[in-house]
Image: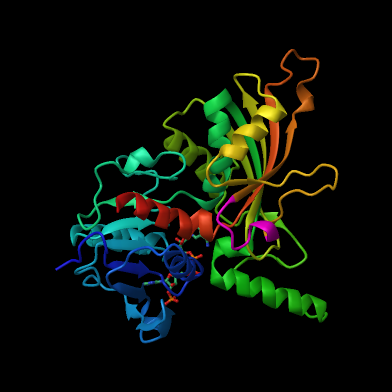
Protein backbone atom coordinates (compact mmCIF):
# COMPACT_ATOMS: atom_id res chain seq x y z
CA UNK A 1 0.00 0.00 0.00
CA UNK A 2 1.34 3.37 -0.91
CA UNK A 3 1.49 5.88 1.91
CA UNK A 4 -1.12 8.58 2.19
CA UNK A 5 0.01 11.21 -0.33
CA UNK A 6 0.23 13.79 2.44
CA UNK A 7 3.36 11.83 3.44
CA UNK A 8 4.39 10.27 0.14
CA UNK A 9 6.86 7.43 -0.15
CA UNK A 10 9.78 8.87 -2.12
CA UNK A 11 12.39 7.15 -4.30
CA UNK A 12 15.54 9.01 -5.30
CA UNK A 13 17.05 7.55 -8.46
CA UNK A 14 20.73 8.50 -8.74
CA UNK A 15 21.00 9.27 -5.03
CA UNK A 16 24.80 8.94 -4.99
CA UNK A 17 25.31 11.62 -7.66
CA UNK A 18 25.77 15.39 -7.39
CA UNK A 19 22.05 16.10 -7.89
CA UNK A 20 20.97 13.06 -5.84
CA UNK A 21 22.93 14.27 -2.84
CA UNK A 22 21.43 17.73 -3.26
CA UNK A 23 17.94 16.16 -3.33
CA UNK A 24 18.55 14.81 0.17
CA UNK A 25 19.68 18.20 1.48
CA UNK A 26 16.75 20.04 -0.12
CA UNK A 27 14.13 17.51 1.07
CA UNK A 28 15.46 17.74 4.60
CA UNK A 29 15.88 21.54 4.65
CA UNK A 30 12.37 22.12 3.30
CA UNK A 31 10.95 19.49 5.63
CA UNK A 32 9.23 17.82 2.69
CA UNK A 33 6.76 15.32 4.21
CA UNK A 34 8.00 11.79 3.54
CA UNK A 35 6.57 8.42 4.52
CA UNK A 36 9.40 6.14 3.48
CA UNK A 37 12.50 6.99 1.46
CA UNK A 38 14.11 4.63 -1.05
CA UNK A 39 17.68 5.32 -2.18
CA UNK A 40 18.43 3.99 -5.65
CA UNK A 41 21.60 3.99 -7.76
CA UNK A 42 23.57 1.57 -9.93
CA UNK A 43 24.79 -1.88 -8.83
CA UNK A 44 28.15 -0.18 -8.10
CA UNK A 45 26.62 1.66 -5.16
CA UNK A 46 24.27 -1.04 -3.86
CA UNK A 47 24.87 -1.61 -0.13
CA UNK A 48 26.39 1.83 0.52
CA UNK A 49 24.95 3.61 3.54
CA UNK A 50 23.62 7.17 3.30
CA UNK A 51 22.31 9.26 6.22
CA UNK A 52 19.04 11.12 5.82
CA UNK A 53 17.10 12.89 8.57
CA UNK A 54 19.25 11.29 11.24
CA UNK A 55 18.75 7.73 9.97
CA UNK A 56 21.09 5.53 7.96
CA UNK A 57 19.65 4.10 4.73
CA UNK A 58 21.00 1.41 2.40
CA UNK A 59 21.40 2.24 -1.29
CA UNK A 60 19.60 -0.31 -3.48
CA UNK A 61 20.29 -1.20 -7.09
CA UNK A 62 17.69 0.31 -9.43
CA UNK A 63 15.55 -2.44 -10.97
CA UNK A 64 12.13 -2.67 -12.60
CA UNK A 65 10.69 -3.64 -9.20
CA UNK A 66 12.07 -0.58 -7.39
CA UNK A 67 8.85 1.48 -7.59
CA UNK A 68 6.41 -0.73 -5.70
CA UNK A 69 4.65 1.42 -3.06
CA UNK A 70 6.47 4.57 -4.22
CA UNK A 71 4.37 7.74 -4.69
CA UNK A 72 7.07 10.12 -5.92
CA UNK A 73 10.20 9.19 -7.88
CA UNK A 74 12.85 11.89 -8.22
CA UNK A 75 15.10 10.89 -11.13
CA UNK A 76 18.67 12.15 -11.65
CA UNK A 77 20.64 9.28 -13.12
CA UNK A 78 20.98 10.37 -16.75
CA UNK A 79 18.71 10.39 -19.77
CA UNK A 80 18.94 6.71 -20.71
CA UNK A 81 17.99 5.60 -17.18
CA UNK A 82 15.04 8.01 -17.21
CA UNK A 83 13.90 6.77 -20.62
CA UNK A 84 14.06 3.15 -19.46
CA UNK A 85 12.71 3.44 -15.91
CA UNK A 86 10.56 6.60 -16.01
CA UNK A 87 7.63 4.86 -17.76
CA UNK A 88 8.05 1.77 -15.52
CA UNK A 89 7.87 4.00 -12.46
CA UNK A 90 4.82 5.85 -13.76
CA UNK A 91 3.12 2.56 -14.65
CA UNK A 92 3.72 1.34 -11.07
CA UNK A 93 1.93 4.46 -9.77
CA UNK A 94 4.95 6.55 -8.78
CA UNK A 95 4.74 10.09 -10.14
CA UNK A 96 8.09 10.96 -11.76
CA UNK A 97 9.88 14.30 -11.58
CA UNK A 98 12.77 13.86 -14.00
CA UNK A 99 15.95 15.91 -14.04
CA UNK A 100 17.32 14.54 -17.30
CA UNK A 101 16.56 15.82 -20.79
CA UNK A 102 14.74 12.56 -21.70
CA UNK A 103 11.16 13.89 -21.67
CA UNK A 104 11.56 17.67 -21.65
CA UNK A 105 10.42 18.22 -25.21
CA UNK A 106 7.91 15.33 -25.30
CA UNK A 107 4.47 16.73 -26.15
CA UNK A 108 2.07 16.30 -23.25
CA UNK A 109 4.83 16.10 -20.63
CA UNK A 110 4.87 19.28 -18.53
CA UNK A 111 8.19 21.15 -18.36
CA UNK A 112 7.98 23.18 -15.21
CA UNK A 113 9.58 26.05 -13.33
CA UNK A 114 7.22 26.58 -10.37
CA UNK A 115 7.72 30.38 -10.38
CA UNK A 116 6.86 30.48 -14.10
CA UNK A 117 4.27 27.86 -15.10
CA UNK A 118 2.95 25.99 -12.04
CA UNK A 119 -0.38 25.56 -13.83
CA UNK A 120 1.29 22.99 -16.12
CA UNK A 121 1.04 20.27 -13.41
CA UNK A 122 -2.70 20.71 -12.94
CA UNK A 123 -4.44 17.34 -12.70
CA UNK A 124 -1.30 15.38 -11.81
CA UNK A 125 -1.51 13.65 -8.44
CA UNK A 126 1.19 11.99 -6.36
CA UNK A 127 0.92 8.22 -6.34
CA UNK A 128 -1.10 8.16 -9.55
CA UNK A 129 1.78 7.96 -12.04
CA UNK A 130 2.67 10.54 -14.65
CA UNK A 131 5.93 12.21 -15.64
CA UNK A 132 6.94 15.84 -15.16
CA UNK A 133 10.21 17.17 -16.59
CA UNK A 134 12.58 19.53 -14.84
CA UNK A 135 14.12 21.97 -17.34
CA UNK A 136 17.81 22.31 -18.10
CA UNK A 137 19.70 24.12 -15.33
CA UNK A 138 20.76 27.08 -17.54
CA UNK A 139 17.16 27.51 -18.72
CA UNK A 140 15.81 27.61 -15.15
CA UNK A 141 18.47 30.08 -13.98
CA UNK A 142 17.61 32.37 -16.92
CA UNK A 143 13.83 32.14 -16.71
CA UNK A 144 13.37 32.80 -12.97
CA UNK A 145 14.50 36.46 -13.37
CA UNK A 146 13.61 36.99 -17.05
CA UNK A 147 9.98 35.79 -16.89
CA UNK A 148 8.71 38.64 -14.64
CA UNK A 149 10.38 41.13 -17.02
CA UNK A 150 8.82 39.30 -19.97
CA UNK A 151 5.39 39.59 -18.31
CA UNK A 152 5.87 43.32 -17.84
CA UNK A 153 7.39 44.29 -21.18
CA UNK A 154 7.41 41.19 -23.49
CA UNK A 155 10.79 39.81 -24.53
CA UNK A 156 10.98 39.81 -28.32
CA UNK A 157 14.65 38.80 -28.50
CA UNK A 158 17.05 37.37 -25.94
CA UNK A 159 20.82 36.88 -26.30
CA UNK A 160 22.39 34.82 -23.51
CA UNK A 161 25.97 33.75 -22.79
CA UNK A 162 26.61 31.26 -20.01
CA UNK A 163 29.53 30.69 -17.63
CA UNK A 164 28.85 27.13 -16.48
CA UNK A 165 30.35 25.40 -13.47
CA UNK A 166 31.83 21.91 -13.12
CA UNK A 167 28.95 20.73 -10.93
CA UNK A 168 26.64 20.93 -13.93
CA UNK A 169 28.48 17.93 -15.35
CA UNK A 170 28.19 15.84 -12.18
CA UNK A 171 30.27 14.68 -9.25
CA UNK A 172 33.08 13.24 -11.40
CA UNK A 173 33.54 16.58 -13.23
CA UNK A 174 33.87 18.40 -9.91
CA UNK A 175 36.51 15.88 -8.83
CA UNK A 176 38.32 16.34 -12.16
CA UNK A 177 38.48 20.13 -11.77
CA UNK A 178 39.87 19.74 -8.27
CA UNK A 179 42.44 17.16 -9.36
CA UNK A 180 43.54 19.20 -12.39
CA UNK A 181 43.94 22.35 -10.29
CA UNK A 182 46.31 20.48 -7.95
CA UNK A 183 48.18 18.93 -10.88
CA UNK A 184 48.69 22.24 -12.70
CA UNK A 185 49.83 24.01 -9.52
CA UNK A 186 52.29 21.14 -8.95
CA UNK A 187 53.62 21.56 -12.51
CA UNK A 188 52.21 18.20 -13.65
CA UNK A 189 50.09 17.56 -16.78
CA UNK A 190 46.33 17.78 -16.17
CA UNK A 191 44.43 14.45 -16.24
CA UNK A 192 41.50 14.74 -18.69
CA UNK A 193 38.86 12.02 -18.29
CA UNK A 194 35.45 13.73 -18.19
CA UNK A 195 36.35 16.64 -20.46
CA UNK A 196 38.59 16.33 -23.52
CA UNK A 197 40.42 19.56 -22.72
CA UNK A 198 42.21 20.95 -19.71
CA UNK A 199 39.58 22.55 -17.48
CA UNK A 200 41.65 24.04 -14.66
CA UNK A 201 42.90 27.56 -15.52
CA UNK A 202 41.02 27.38 -18.82
CA UNK A 203 37.52 27.67 -20.29
CA UNK A 204 35.89 26.08 -23.31
CA UNK A 205 32.71 25.87 -25.33
CA UNK A 206 30.10 23.64 -23.61
CA UNK A 207 30.95 19.96 -23.90
CA UNK A 208 27.56 18.88 -25.36
CA UNK A 209 27.43 17.72 -28.99
CA UNK A 210 27.61 20.39 -31.70
CA UNK A 211 24.81 20.23 -34.29
CA UNK A 212 24.97 20.91 -38.04
CA UNK A 213 23.92 24.53 -37.47
CA UNK A 214 26.91 25.13 -35.18
CA UNK A 215 24.87 25.30 -31.96
CA UNK A 216 25.65 22.80 -29.21
CA UNK A 217 22.84 20.87 -27.50
CA UNK A 218 22.95 22.96 -24.34
CA UNK A 219 22.34 26.14 -26.36
CA UNK A 220 19.42 24.60 -28.24
CA UNK A 221 17.91 23.36 -24.96
CA UNK A 222 17.84 26.94 -23.68
CA UNK A 223 16.02 28.08 -26.81
CA UNK A 224 13.51 25.22 -27.16
CA UNK A 225 12.75 24.78 -23.47
CA UNK A 226 12.06 28.50 -23.04
CA UNK A 227 9.54 28.38 -25.86
CA UNK A 228 7.83 25.34 -24.31
CA UNK A 229 7.74 26.80 -20.77
CA UNK A 230 6.46 30.17 -21.96
CA UNK A 231 4.07 28.43 -24.36
CA UNK A 232 5.17 30.94 -26.98
CA UNK A 233 7.61 30.42 -29.85
CA UNK A 234 7.69 34.07 -30.87
CA UNK A 235 10.57 35.31 -28.69
CA UNK A 236 13.78 35.05 -30.71
CA UNK A 237 16.51 33.48 -28.58
CA UNK A 238 20.19 32.75 -29.17
CA UNK A 239 22.66 31.29 -26.68
CA UNK A 240 26.41 30.73 -26.31
CA UNK A 241 27.24 28.17 -23.62
CA UNK A 242 30.71 28.00 -22.07
CA UNK A 243 32.23 25.95 -19.25
CA UNK A 244 34.33 27.93 -16.81
CA UNK A 245 36.54 26.48 -14.05
CA UNK A 246 34.12 27.28 -11.24
CA UNK A 247 33.19 24.43 -8.91
CA UNK A 248 29.53 25.21 -8.39
CA UNK A 249 26.84 27.68 -9.64
CA UNK A 250 26.39 28.96 -13.17
CA UNK A 251 26.39 32.59 -14.30
CA UNK A 252 24.76 34.10 -17.38
CA UNK A 253 24.96 37.39 -19.25
CA UNK A 254 21.55 38.21 -20.71
CA UNK A 255 20.58 40.91 -23.22
CA UNK A 256 16.87 41.50 -23.75
CA UNK A 257 15.01 43.30 -26.51
CA UNK A 258 11.60 44.30 -25.21
CA UNK A 259 8.34 45.20 -26.95
CA UNK A 260 7.70 47.96 -24.41
CA UNK A 261 9.99 50.50 -22.80
CA UNK A 262 11.27 49.49 -19.38
CA UNK A 263 13.51 51.69 -17.28
CA UNK A 264 16.27 50.29 -15.09
CA UNK A 265 14.31 51.43 -12.04
CA UNK A 266 11.17 49.65 -13.23
CA UNK A 267 13.15 46.49 -13.98
CA UNK A 268 14.77 46.60 -10.54
CA UNK A 269 11.36 47.02 -8.90
CA UNK A 270 9.97 44.02 -10.78
CA UNK A 271 13.01 41.87 -9.93
CA UNK A 272 12.87 42.97 -6.31
CA UNK A 273 9.37 41.53 -6.00
CA UNK A 274 10.01 38.44 -8.14
CA UNK A 275 9.85 35.10 -6.30
CA UNK A 276 13.17 33.26 -6.20
CA UNK A 277 15.20 36.36 -7.16
CA UNK A 278 17.69 38.37 -5.08
CA UNK A 279 19.42 41.52 -6.32
CA UNK A 280 23.12 42.27 -5.90
CA UNK A 281 23.61 45.43 -7.94
CA UNK A 282 25.99 47.81 -6.20
CA UNK A 283 27.51 49.99 -8.92
CA UNK A 284 29.42 52.20 -6.49
CA UNK A 285 31.36 49.27 -5.08
CA UNK A 286 31.42 47.30 -8.34
CA UNK A 287 29.71 44.44 -6.52
CA UNK A 288 27.53 42.14 -8.58
CA UNK A 289 26.46 38.44 -8.40
CA UNK A 290 29.17 35.78 -8.31
CA UNK A 291 28.93 31.98 -8.31
CA UNK A 292 30.18 32.02 -4.72
CA UNK A 293 27.22 34.23 -3.75
CA UNK A 294 24.85 31.74 -5.34
CA UNK A 295 26.49 28.48 -4.16
CA UNK A 296 24.29 26.55 -1.78
CA UNK A 297 21.55 29.21 -2.07
CA UNK A 298 18.02 28.88 -3.42
CA UNK A 299 17.64 32.26 -5.13
CA UNK A 300 18.91 33.42 -8.50
CA UNK A 301 21.08 36.49 -7.96
CA UNK A 302 20.74 39.37 -10.44
CA UNK A 303 22.88 42.43 -11.07
CA UNK A 304 24.41 44.66 -13.79
CA UNK A 305 20.83 45.80 -14.43
CA UNK A 306 21.36 48.49 -17.07
CA UNK A 307 19.91 49.94 -20.22
CA UNK A 308 21.50 48.62 -23.41
CA UNK A 309 23.22 51.69 -24.90
CA UNK A 310 23.64 50.08 -28.32
CA UNK A 311 20.11 51.32 -29.04
CA UNK A 312 20.95 54.97 -28.50
CA UNK A 313 20.12 57.06 -31.54
CA UNK A 314 18.03 54.30 -33.10
CA UNK A 315 14.70 55.41 -31.71
CA UNK A 316 14.72 52.20 -29.67
CA UNK A 317 16.16 53.68 -26.47
CA UNK A 318 14.66 52.00 -23.40
CA UNK A 319 13.71 48.82 -25.26
CA UNK A 320 16.91 46.95 -24.35
CA UNK A 321 18.11 45.65 -21.00
CA UNK A 322 21.28 43.88 -19.81
CA UNK A 323 21.47 41.57 -16.80
CA UNK A 324 24.09 39.36 -15.18
CA UNK A 325 22.71 36.45 -13.16
CA UNK A 326 24.09 33.61 -11.08
CA UNK A 327 22.31 30.57 -9.66
CA UNK A 328 23.23 27.28 -8.05
CA UNK A 329 22.37 24.77 -10.70
CA UNK A 330 22.50 21.80 -8.33
CA UNK A 331 19.80 23.53 -6.27
CA UNK A 332 17.48 25.76 -8.32
CA UNK A 333 18.81 24.30 -11.58
CA UNK A 334 18.04 20.74 -10.49
CA UNK A 335 17.12 19.39 -7.03
CA UNK A 336 15.32 22.41 -5.57
CA UNK A 337 13.24 23.02 -8.69
CA UNK A 338 12.22 19.34 -8.76
CA UNK A 339 11.26 19.35 -5.08
CA UNK A 340 9.28 22.58 -5.61
CA UNK A 341 7.43 20.78 -8.42
CA UNK A 342 6.69 17.90 -6.03
CA UNK A 343 5.42 20.42 -3.46
CA UNK A 344 2.88 21.63 -6.02
CA UNK A 345 1.49 18.09 -6.04
CA UNK A 346 1.11 17.70 -2.25
N1 LIG B 1 24.58 18.40 -12.29
C1 LIG B 1 23.62 19.26 -12.56
O1 LIG B 1 23.70 20.46 -12.23
C2 LIG B 1 22.38 18.84 -13.26
C3 LIG B 1 21.39 19.80 -13.47
C4 LIG B 1 20.21 19.44 -14.09
C5 LIG B 1 20.06 18.13 -14.50
N2 LIG B 1 21.04 17.22 -14.29
C6 LIG B 1 20.81 15.84 -14.74
O2 LIG B 1 20.73 14.97 -13.62
C7 LIG B 1 21.28 13.71 -13.97
C8 LIG B 1 22.39 13.35 -12.97
O3 LIG B 1 23.36 14.36 -12.94
P1 LIG B 1 24.49 14.42 -11.83
O4 LIG B 1 25.19 15.68 -12.12
O5 LIG B 1 23.95 14.16 -10.47
O6 LIG B 1 25.43 13.18 -12.28
P2 LIG B 1 26.41 12.27 -11.40
O7 LIG B 1 26.98 13.05 -10.27
O8 LIG B 1 27.33 11.66 -12.38
O9 LIG B 1 25.45 11.12 -10.79
C9 LIG B 1 24.86 10.14 -11.59
C10 LIG B 1 23.96 9.26 -10.74
O10 LIG B 1 23.30 8.32 -11.60
C11 LIG B 1 23.49 7.02 -11.08
N3 LIG B 1 23.52 6.02 -12.13
C12 LIG B 1 24.39 5.92 -13.15
N4 LIG B 1 24.14 4.81 -13.89
C13 LIG B 1 23.10 4.19 -13.28
C14 LIG B 1 22.38 2.99 -13.53
N5 LIG B 1 22.68 2.17 -14.56
N6 LIG B 1 21.36 2.65 -12.69
C15 LIG B 1 21.05 3.44 -11.65
N7 LIG B 1 21.70 4.59 -11.35
C16 LIG B 1 22.70 4.95 -12.16
C17 LIG B 1 24.81 7.10 -10.37
O11 LIG B 1 24.92 6.01 -9.48
P3 LIG B 1 26.37 5.34 -9.12
O12 LIG B 1 27.00 6.24 -8.11
O13 LIG B 1 25.97 4.02 -8.57
O14 LIG B 1 27.13 5.27 -10.40
C18 LIG B 1 24.69 8.47 -9.69
O15 LIG B 1 23.88 8.34 -8.52
C19 LIG B 1 21.73 13.84 -15.41
O16 LIG B 1 20.68 13.39 -16.24
C20 LIG B 1 21.93 15.31 -15.60
O17 LIG B 1 21.75 15.72 -16.93
C21 LIG B 1 22.19 17.55 -13.67
Image side of residue 196 versus residue 200, left or right: left
Image side of residue 248 versus residue 184, left or right: left
Where's ligand 1: which quadrant? Answer: bottom left
Confirm whether residue 190 shows in the render.
Answer: no
- x, y (%) of residue 319? 68, 21
Looking at the rendering, the stretch of residues picked out in magenta corresponds to 292-299
Q: Is residue 156 above or below residue 196?
A: above
- x, y (%) of residue 144? 54, 43
Q: Residue at x 40, y 65 (%)?
A: 31
Q: Residue at x 57, y 44 (%)?
A: 219
Q: Residue at x 64, y 65 (%)?
A: 196
Residue 203 occupies quadrant: bottom right
Residue 121 occupies quadrant: top left
Q: Main secondary structure of the magenta part?
A: loop
Please check the rendered image and state whether residue 298 is part of the magenta-colored stretch, yes or no: yes
Confirm whether residue 5 shows in the render.
Answer: yes
- x, y (%) of residue 343? 36, 54
Please check the rendered image and state whether residue 74 is part of the magenta-colored stretch, yes or no: no
Please identify the quadrant where the N terminus is shown.
Answer: bottom left
Residue extending furthest toward the top: 315
Given residues 69 and 7, the one toward you in this image is 7
Q: Is residue 89 above or below residue 252?
A: below
Q: Is residue 341 above or below residue 310?
A: below
Image side of residue 46 versus residue 243, left or right: left
Q: Residue at x 41, y 45 (%)?
A: 112
Given residues 58 and 135, the one toward you in this image is 58
- x, y (%) of residue 98? 37, 56
Amino acid sequence: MAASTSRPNVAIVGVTGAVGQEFLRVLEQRNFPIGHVKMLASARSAGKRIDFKGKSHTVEELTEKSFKDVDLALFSAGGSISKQYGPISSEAGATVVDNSSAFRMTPGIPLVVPEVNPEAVKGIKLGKGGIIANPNCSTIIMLVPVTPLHRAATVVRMVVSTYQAASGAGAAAMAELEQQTREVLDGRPATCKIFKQQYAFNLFSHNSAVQDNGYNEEELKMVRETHKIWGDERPKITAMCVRVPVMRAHAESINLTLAKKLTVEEAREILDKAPGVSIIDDRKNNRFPTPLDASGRDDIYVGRIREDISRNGSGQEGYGLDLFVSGDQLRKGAALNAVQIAELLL
